[in-house]
């Protein structure tokens, strides 16, 4: 089955007038945000003209754009597929922002693709592999807005003031969360330019935000797409319709955009989010909501305090950290023992609740499948009550 690379190659000689911009094009742009364009694509305040994809692939720092060995080869193929095509080759790539600040627990990146008509496609990066990026993700469990949500709004407003045409907001994973947040919260002048918000397997929000007037007003512009074994895309509170597509991956690897099935110029529709994924999603969400926001904050602080105390080699990513402590897991237990008694008590409660939620989800999920309409994402707090009935 074809993937986004095949789609880009197949339509290389067909511009947007021949085949209009599609949800697959949006996923391609979302994936390209994971490349490191530092020193290659002009920044938001630079005042410089954008660059073409061809200029990007010919840049002297080309190899530095692909930080993860696991995805480097596929990202190179995708970038080269768009670089010399009629469809994407005339686009301008501009307004690149990339912020990673461990002290402020911030991981934010965005870039804008501008077509010949002056229409802009603002794409937000999802979570990278850094400990800082994952810390910010965990912050979403108890607070809103998190740092990257605060940054995505002025970014959108600034780009909207610089380009003449319409705007589409795009993002995969956390990037999809940011696309929705920016579209809902930005000022009226920018909001009037936004015609669509494309989110791909993104985690949800606090209940307060998805029930807010701003979110509800933006909802008609949102298209959310998830794979059949969606895990990330069903976390926290969600609402509204969504599309299910097939993927070659299994479990968490369905989250990978390169795995999503394409037939011709469209994704291949899936049936529904499958039971295995629902069990995991229900377990996680019931566990989160079994704790108060204050307890969630203490748990997250404690979790990353343990990571920091055991990170003697100053690993930047969770992968590096886990490799460093392999064979020395006793250091993790020692770090937990050093926590104050109240924090240890909350961690204990969190893990007990997690196991309890897992048991409940295994028995409740089949009932939820029968009751829940496939094309709707229920408010999770409400659905959890239904599952327990």
Image: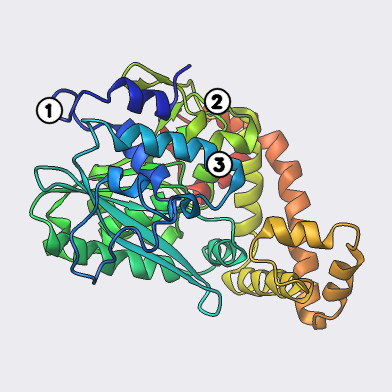
**Alpha-carbon distance for marks 3 and 1?**
31 Å
Residue 282 in the image: x percent, y percent? 62, 43
Q: In this view, does 278 lie to the left or right of 36?
A: right
- Disc 2 to disc 1, how far (Cα)? 43 Å
Q: Name the quadrant containing residue 265.
A: top left
Q: Name the residue under label 2.
A: 370
Mark positioned earlier in the residue sequence (3 or 1) = 1
* Pair 2/1: label in front: 1
Q: How crowded is mark 2: few (under 14 residues within 10 Å), some or many (20 or more)?
A: few
Image side of residue 339 versus residue 118, left or right: right
Query: Which of 193/65 is in front?
Result: 65
Please, what secondary structure does the residue beneath circle 3 have? Answer: helix
**Which residue is depicted at the point 68% across and 71% down?**
304
Circle nearer the viewer, 2 or 3: 3
Corner quadrant of residue 72 = top right
Instruction: Name the residue carrying label 3.
Output: 71
Q: Distance from label 2 to label 3 (Cα)? A: 38 Å
In the depicted structure, whether residue 312 falls above or below residue 291: below
């Amino acid at each position: 089955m074809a993937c986004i690379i095949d789609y880009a190659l197949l339509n290389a000689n067909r511009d947007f007038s021949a085949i209009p911009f599609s949800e697959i094009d949006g996923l391609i742009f979302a994936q390209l945000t994971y490349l490191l364009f530092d020193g290659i694509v002009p920044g938001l305040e630079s005042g410089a003209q954008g660059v073409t994809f061809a200029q990007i692939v010919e840049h002297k720092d080309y190899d530095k754009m692909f930080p993860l060995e696991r995805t480097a080869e596929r990202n190179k193929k995708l970038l080269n597929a768009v670089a010399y095509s009629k469809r994407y080759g005339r686009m301008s790539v501009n307004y690149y922002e990339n912020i990673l600040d461990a002290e402020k627990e911030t991981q934010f990146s965005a870039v804008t693709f501008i077509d010949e008509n002056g229409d802009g496609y603002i794409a937000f990066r999802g979570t990278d592999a850094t400990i800082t990026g994952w810390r910010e993700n965990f912050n979403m469990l108890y607070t809103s807005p998190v740092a990257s949500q605060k940054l995505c709004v002025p970014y959108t407003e600034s780009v909207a003031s610089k380009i003449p045409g319409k705007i589409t907001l795009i993002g995969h994973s956390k990037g999809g969360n940011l696309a929705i947040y920016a579209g809902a919260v930005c000022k009226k002048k920018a909001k009037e330019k936004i015609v669509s918000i494309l989110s791909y397997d993104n985690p949800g929000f606090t209940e307060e935000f998805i029930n807010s007037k701003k979110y509800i007003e933006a909802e008609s512009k949102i298209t959310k797409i998830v794979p059949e074994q969606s895990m990330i895309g069903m976390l926290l509170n969600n609402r509204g319709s969504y599309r299910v597509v097939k993927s070659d991956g299994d479990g968490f690897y369905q989250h990978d955009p390169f795995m999503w099935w394409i037939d011709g110029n469209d994704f291949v529709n899936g049936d529904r989010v499958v039971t295995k994924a629902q069990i995991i999603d229900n377990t996680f969400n019931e566990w989160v909501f079994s704790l108060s926001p204050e307890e969630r904050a203490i748990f997250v602080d404690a979790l990353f305090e343990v990571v920091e105390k055991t990170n003697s080699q100053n690993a930047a990513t969770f992968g590096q950290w886990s490799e460093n402590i392999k064979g020395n897991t006793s250091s993790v237990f020692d770090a937990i023992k050093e926590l104050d008694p109240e924090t240890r008590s909350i961690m204990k409660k969190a893990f007990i609740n997690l196991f309890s939620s897992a048991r409940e989800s295994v028995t409740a999920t089949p009932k939820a499948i029968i009751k829940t309409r496939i094309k709707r994402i229920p408010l999770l707090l409400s659905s959890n009550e239904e599952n327990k009935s």
